[in-house]
Structure formats: C-alpha cells, structure tokens
Amino acid sequence: MTTPALNLFGRIGLYATVFFTGASVMVIELLGTRLIAPFYGASLYVWSSLISVTMIALAIGYFVGGRWADRTKPSSLALIIGLAAVLTLVIPWLNRPILLLTDPLGLRAGAFVSAFLLFFPSLTCLGMVGPLAIKLAASRLEGIGNTAGSLYAVSTFGSVIGTLTLGFFLFPMLGSREILIGLGLLLLVLAIVVAVYEQKRLAMPSSILPCVLLAAVALMMTPKIISAGFVDTFSKGSQVLSAKESLYGWVRVIDQPAQDLRLLAADASVIGASNISDNQSRLSYQDIVGVIPSLVPKMTKALIVGQGAGHMAEILHSRYGISTDTLEIDPAVAAAATDFFKFKPTGKAIVGDGRYEIRRLQGPYDLIIHDCFTGGSEPAHLLTVETLAQLQSLLSDQGILAVNFVAFAEGEHSDALASVAKTIAQVFPKQTVFVSEPGKNFNDFIFLASRQAIDLDAKTLQPTQSAWLKERLLNITNPNGVVLTDDFNPIEHLQTAKAEHYRHFIVDWLGADLLIR
C-alpha cells in the first residue's frame, strides 16, 4: 500500500509535529534532572545518566521507527505520539517507587537505572517519530535526503526552542511535575489531531479510537498523578511549612515540634536549622564560626557565600556589630530565610551565582565565610584555586577565609578533605582546621585560611574559648589529596561516598519524602 502524497497543509502539520516532539525530548531530559536531583543530587553522575539514557532511547527509537516505517502497511504516527504522551504522564506517578527501588544500587548505578526506568519508554517513542515522519513526507525516492534532513533540522530546532522555553519561562513559573503533566496532555491532543488527519486525508487505518482510549485512560489517571506529588506531613513527625521548587532545587521549610526544631532543606541538603521557640541556630559548626571574630579584633565587615537560613549573619551582627553582605544563589532559599527564620540583612543581600557575583564585589572584607558544601552535590566550581584566589583578593590584610566542608576525616573516603587542604594551601600561606563534633569521622570541617597564622592563645579569646577551639583542632595527614582547579576538579567523584552517606542519614532522620518530589 502506497502512502498518499501530503498536501501543503499536511506538510506544514508534519513539520509542526516533529518540531513539538523534538521540543518534548529536551523538556523531558531536562526535567529528568529535576525529579532525580533531590534524591541523587544534581551531580555530574545524574547529568551523565540522563544524557546517556536520552541518547540510548533516541537511537533505539530511530531504529525501531525506521523498521516500523518500512512495513508494507502504513503505520500510525498518531498512535506512537499517544503512547509517548501516556508514558510521559506516568513519570511523576512512578518517580517515588522507582527512586526508592534503586536506592540500594548506590549513587552512580541508582541514578542511571532510575533515569532509564523513568524516561527511556517515552523518549524511545518520541525517537520513533522522525523515521515515521520521513516515511509520510517522502512520496517518492527522489528528494528523500532533503526531506529527511529538513525534518531532522526542524526537530532539532524544536529541541532548542523547548530548552530555552523551559529554562527561561516555564521553570520560574511552574513545578517540574506540573510541566510534565502539561506536556503529556499536549502530546495527547497532538496525537488525536494527527489521527484525524491520517484517517481523513491519507486514507490510513484509523488510529482515532486507540488515541481516544489512551486519552481517556490518561485523563482518569491525571488526578491521581497530581495528588501523588504533594506531601505536607513526613514520617518521623515532621510538618512542611513551605515547599517551593526553584531554578536550583526543591526548597522546603520543615518543623519537628517534638524536638523544637525547624529545618531549611534544599534538595538533599539541610542548610539551616534552628529552635522553633527562639530561632537560635542548631548547626554546631556555626558555634566555631561565631568565635572567629575574637581571633582578629576590630572586624567590621564580612561576606557570607551561601547564606542559608541567615543565622551566621545575625550572630556576627549581634555579638560583634559586624556588617555582613550575604550571597545566595537560590531566591527560594533567600525568601525562606526571611519568611521563616527572621533573617534581616545587615549589609547587602545579593541573590545570584557565586562566581559571577564574587567578581563584582568590592572589598575589603575582614571575614569571608564560604558555606556551600553540605549534603547533596558539590558546587565544584566554587572550590578551586581560582575561586579561592578571587576570595583572597577581597580580604583585608588581617582577613580570614572560613570554609565549611562536610566530609570524612579518615579512611578511604578522606581524600576529599585532603584535597581541600591542598587547594587552600596553594592560595593561602596559613590554614587551621577545626572539626565540628570531635570523635566523629563524618563531620563538618572548618578551614580558617589567612596570610598570618591563627593564634589560639590570643588575649582577645577567653580561656574557655581557647580550650574549646583547641579540642577541635584537626591535623590532616592524608597525603593523597589533589589540587582542585577550574581545569581539573574531581571533587564530585571524591565525595560520592559522602553524598550517599548524607542521603541515607536524611532518609533515616526525616523519611524518604523529603528527597522525593
């Protein structure tokens, strides 16, 4: 049976179809990182997994679609789009059980298998659209190369527009689940439109009824899919006060009334903790940070990179009268700090990317607190020789850089801590390292870097403060660390065990719902 030639309306419709399905591929791929990142982090492993799964799915889709297109009977493009729509709609519904299922596999295997199970089916169907479209558009062998090239060019252009639309417009306005559901419903509408055209104009076997049945099933499932994503009470007796998906992650404010505890969480990281009753910080490493101004008297100006809940800025101002500029990448975190943790800026409150904004800052600062390395993924670009040199240039002559870093102190996973020490040593002549909770291998480590040695017997310190700090001194002896630079920075690889340990700690503490959207 020969496929009838498309008229002008049909060709325009076909190009519009491949444009929209091309855009859908990139939307699903990018949204994939947003669904997986709260559980496995937005690390290079997650991105590599999503990109690999997308390429595998498209390759198989092209192959299967080509074989299907060459069958004697014309096959239904509409039915394939309808299947892609349903498989896209069920992704948010399957997200939780699949992430929990893959958790025992570890960070790398878990991220890849999760991506494969969630996104491979829909992406494979979308990959089949190209060969089927070429079959419909090519009424004769002559010119088939131009037809194929044009269709794939339009599909790729659709991917570009889909990427820009998602990143510039949809993400700031809608959550990832809502976008996926909306995309699935739009693909269903497209499938029905294509089915009508196939039957009316191309005299092809009807796919209207199958597409309508798929749409009916999808519409019945949609309310359950939507409701499956909303959790306002976790296990472990926690309650959600605020939940917002930002450009950078899933930000939540969580109360544990029984413990008088309020948490600020961004994906898999707890970046703020305080008493509900009096808003006093509950993060122990901040006790060390609060003593730093006593080491160098007459500090007047500070900078915090990684504002979090804002407690450190408040401590510096209330205890020492220090004016503090804060730099936070995530507007949702900055808003939560103000709305739920009573944060009031004592200097400039800057919301923007760290490296970009640091270049625009005017020093000098007497103290810079670099606090971006807690749970989840490491912002590797903020922990390199180049970044530390930028921060050093903003310090006064007596200024101190304090870096908070979560890691293992000893054993096979301690190379990350040693690497931070080596990297700081490339920029600063002197460094002193403190451990937040003595005796624990997995810990917060506070590096104090400066041009002069830190004097723990300084007269400005009270004897109890001096003894307390000395109890927390740490000598890093691991020789296996590497210097981290913009060109070579394996910190994510070195911190794989840390990310897994932190994730399991959060799940055991608050339940898996914190990490699953």
Image (cartoon, rainbow, N blue to C red):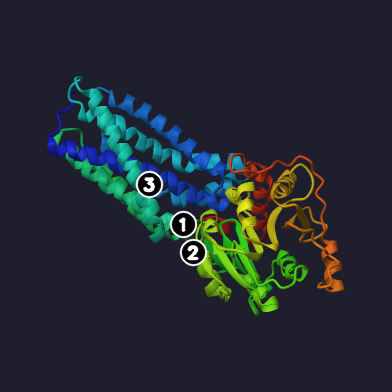
Give the numbered dot on residue 331.
2
Residue 463: quarter of image: bottom right
Under tag 3, what secondary structure?
Answer: helix
Residue 213 image position (x, y, % from top left) = 29, 46
Residue drawn at x 82%, y 65% is: 469
> Looking at the image, do the residues carrying marks 1 and 2 touch, with CB atoms under 8 Å apart?
yes
Q: Looking at the picture, tell me which residue is in the foreground, 90 or 246.
A: 246
Residue kind at label 2, given as amino acid type = Pro
Residue 319 image position (x, y, % from top left) = 70, 77
Q: Of callouts 1 and 2, which one flags the residue occurring earlier in the amino acid sequence?
A: 1
Residue 515: quarter of image: bottom right
Res. 241 in view: no
Residue drawn at x 70%, y 76% is: 320
In the rendered image, the quadrant that contains the N terminus is top left
Under tag 2, what secondary structure?
Answer: helix
Which residue, given by chain and number where applicable, does mark 1 sit on? 247
Q: Looking at the picture, tell me which residue is in the foreground, 188 or 280.
A: 280
Question: What's the distance in space between the residues labelled 1 and 2, CA to CA?
Answer: 9 Å
Residue kind at label 1, given as amino acid type = Leu
Under tag 1, what secondary structure?
Answer: loop
Residue kind at label 3, given as amino acid type = Thr
Q: Is 239 displayed left or right of 7 in the figure?
A: right
Q: Is 188 displayed left or right of 347 in the figure?
A: left
